[in-house]
Amino acid sequence: MASPGFLWGVATASYQIEGAIHADGRLPSIWDTFSATPGKTLGGDSGEHACEHYTRWAEDVDLIADLGVDGYRLSIAWPRVMHADGTPNAAGLDFYRRLLTRLGERGIRRFVTLYHWDLPQHLEDRGGWLNRDTAWRFADYAALVARELRGLVDGWMTLNEPWCSAFLGYGNGHHAPGLADPRYATQAMHHLLLGHGLGLQAIREHDPGTPAGIVANVGRGTTDSSDPADIEAARLYELQHNDWVLQPLLAGRYPADLFERLWPGSAPLVLPGDMDLIRQPLDFLGINYYFRSNLRSDGATGFRDVPLDGVERTQMGWEVYPQGLEDLLRRFKAVYPNLPPVYITENGMASDDAVVDGRVDDPQRQSYLKRHFAAVSAAMDAGVEVRGYFVWSLMDNFEWAFGYERRFGLVHVDYTTQARTLKDSALAFRTFLQQRRAAALPAALTT
């Protein structure tokens, strides 16, 4: 499928696996607050304990190394490494320093996301991403982490999925902090992207030799209708889901239709110089892809989701549609001439997995991954530069508003005992990587 230098990895996020939310001076995050609010998460679940990665990190590094992957994508918990006054929290930084050092000793490349949604609550109390000042506080945080962890990171990622932070957090309230107004979403997005630009500058000042980028979630939108209004609805869906983030990053502007048609009167306040900060060249772009949506016109200026019957779905209810990943990669290359090298930073699926006689049989996940690997390969054959692929996720974890019910991991986690069990998909992935490695060796080394 890919060249010998292609990177294969697995991914996690701090709040979803670490637990230990009260340990060693960690501050409260918006997800602590949101999860503690009745009715916000399934079963009232929170990340208080999660996978106890904060104390079991060495065991988990062994797990990663045993899989035989080339890289590991993790995130830093902002509330764990920085006090409210902006000074470093040595205990929190030491945790990540130990983790990253051990990963390096095991020959695993380290890709670090600075913001995977766990904003310190004290910043949300001052407006969160609706407050322009938060972008500068993010830059301070990025500078601190890049300075403290310099030499231990192989790739920096400023934000994970700003679409989710802005729309789910401020537009419809599904995620922390739970606000719901399109005007909030568009302003939050602008400040998130501004924070990305400022954070990129901070990384390049304090760790100039390490590549840096951002991670965007993307979705394929199509329609089963030939009605021009429905075809337009599918276009608007992708504009809102994809180009709302990619166009400012790569073209230095927001899609006009977004504010004129979908959310009239919701254009954010953009000050002179903002777009230049946002559209700084990226060393790479992370792409997270999971599913396709079938769209129809809502009868006004927008779209509505009309799920198709008879299609394969995951535990999340998301349609399995690998072709969508190839389609989007091809489109991004065609629309954005300056598209940087791409990493697939998340791709995977949730299923209702259980350990039976010491084994977790998950054939759908194995099939899902194989088909998405093939979709990426086809995009590469079409000229898209994809440098690596991270499976989401290393292990089952706290799936945000869905709590612990939805299992995305290659590794099953028993949340009572914290026992880790490699699922059949993990065993198959390990075998795949072993075979690729053996095939890349000179014949003299394999006999």
Image (spheres, helix red, strand yellow):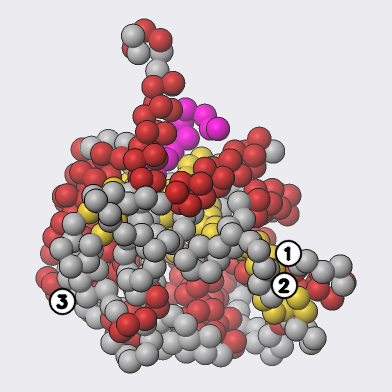
Q: Is residue 104 visible?
A: yes
Q: Residue at x 67, y 68 (%)?
A: 309
Q: Is residue 236 magenta?
A: no
Q: CA distance from mark 3 to mark 1?
A: 45 Å
Q: How many numbered dots are placed on residues in this image?
A: 3
For marks 2 and 3 on the same chain, the one whose residue lies earlier in the sequence: 3
Q: Residue at x 27, y 36 (%)?
A: 107
Report which residue position mark 1 lands on.
222
Q: Is residue 34 left or right of residue 98?
A: right
Q: Residue at x 39, y 63 (%)?
A: 352
Amino acid carrying mark 2 in the image: Leu
As displayed, is residue 289 above or below residue 63?
A: below
For residue 295, which numbered disc appears in the image?
A: 2
Percent position of residue 196, x then y: 47, 65
Report which residue position mark 3 lands on.
22
Q: Residue at x 51, y 46 (%)?
A: 367
For marks 3 and 1 on the same chain, the one whose residue lies earlier in the sequence: 3
For the residue carrying disc 2, how many other residues have a C-alpha within 10 Å: few (<14), some (14-19), or many (20+)?
Answer: many
Q: Which residues are magenta?
A: 1-11
Q: Which secondary structure lies at badge 2?
A: strand
As displayed, is residue 206 above or below residue 298?
A: above
For marks 1 and 2 on the same chain, the one whose residue lies earlier in the sequence: 1
Amino acid carrying mark 1 in the image: Thr
Compare residues 356 and 301 and report the one nearer the observer: 356
Say if mark 1 contacts mark 2, CB within 8 Å: yes
Instruction: Place residue 319 in its image quadrant.
Output: bottom right
Percent position of residue 278, x then y: 55, 65
The N terminus lies in which quarter of the figure? top right
Percent position of residue 235, x then y: 75, 68
Amino acid carrying mark 3 in the image: His
